[in-house]
Image (spheres, rainbow, N blue to C red):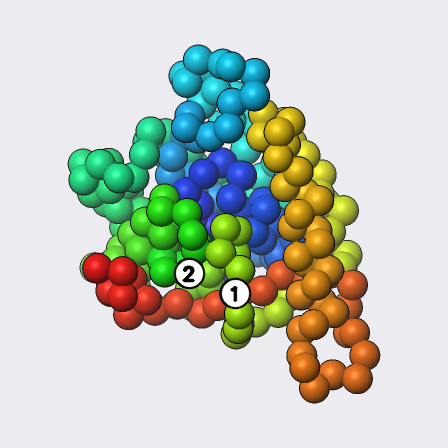
Amino acid sequence: MNVLLVSAHPDDMEIGMGGTAAKLAERGDSLTSVILTDGRRSPNPFNLQPEVLAQIREEEARKAATLLGVKEIIACGFPDLVSAENYSTAKQMIKELISKIQPGEIYTLHPELDRHPSHRLAGKMLLESMEECEVQCDVWAYEVWGLFNQWHRIEDISAQIGKKIQAISEHKSQVACISYAEGVTGLNRWRAIFADPQQTKSGTAFAEAFIRCSILDSKKTE
């Protein structure tokens, strides 16, 4: 199955669904990861020029995604998604890619529940692209800056947690100042333990949570 991963920033996918991405690749799915912005506005602990930081972040993203088993990494290179021109151009790119690869599943950021504005724009754009392409498949939102208080799917990533941590660690320019792996590992542990309030024992060690999205979710943000 072809699977499309759409992220706003170079490290979103690894943080939010790195374990699931590795799991999908292991079962033989063909993963294409699209990174919409170049991350030049991210934390910059080494005081690099924006263009240099953007180049480094792309290199880090390619190493991380390759480690997870992603087949193709597409770095769109937009400085932001706030600009109407950037948003429109990026959406056209996503529409063309959806039509080309005909994904069986798509993963992205939630257009409403994520607290980061660029993340919400990425999710909104993806859902709009699907509606305009008239393509129907499951769209799963993963969590980064907005934790879900309910979910439609829990994915056991116990066997992939080590690979996920390694992938996040490839984003050296970011983990130099923010302990993303430590934070999300704690979240994945919590998801596993508290997956079901009716359970009598923990079914897994680490898990990622997902919400199924529809075009209605994007329209709530308008």
Give the percent coordinates (x, y) of residue 53. 48, 20
> Mark 1 = which residue?
148
Please indicate whether residue 18 sits to the left or right of residue 92 in the image: right
Give the percent coordinates (x, y) of residue 191. 67, 65
Residue flagged by tag 1: what amino acid is it?
Phe
Q: Is 155 rendered above or below residue 62? A: below
Please indicate whether residue 204 sits to the left or right of residue 84 in the image: right
Q: 118 or 57, which lies in front? A: 118
> Mark 2 = which residue?
113
Residue plotted at (41% across, 18% down): 50
Residue plotted at (54% across, 33% down): 61
Give the percent coordinates (x, y) of residue 67. 66, 38
Dot 2 alpha-carbon crowd within 10 angstroms: few under 14, some 14 to 19, many 20 or more: some
Residue 98 visible = no
The C terminus sits in image quarter:
bottom left
Residue flagged by tag 2: what amino acid is it?
Leu
Give the percent coordinates (x, y) of residue 121. 32, 49
Q: 208 or 220, which lies in front? A: 220
Number of callouts: 2
Please indicate whether residue 18 sits to the left or right of residue 74 in the image: right
Contact between labelled residues 2 and 1, with CB atoms less than 8 Å apart = yes
Residue 182 visible = yes
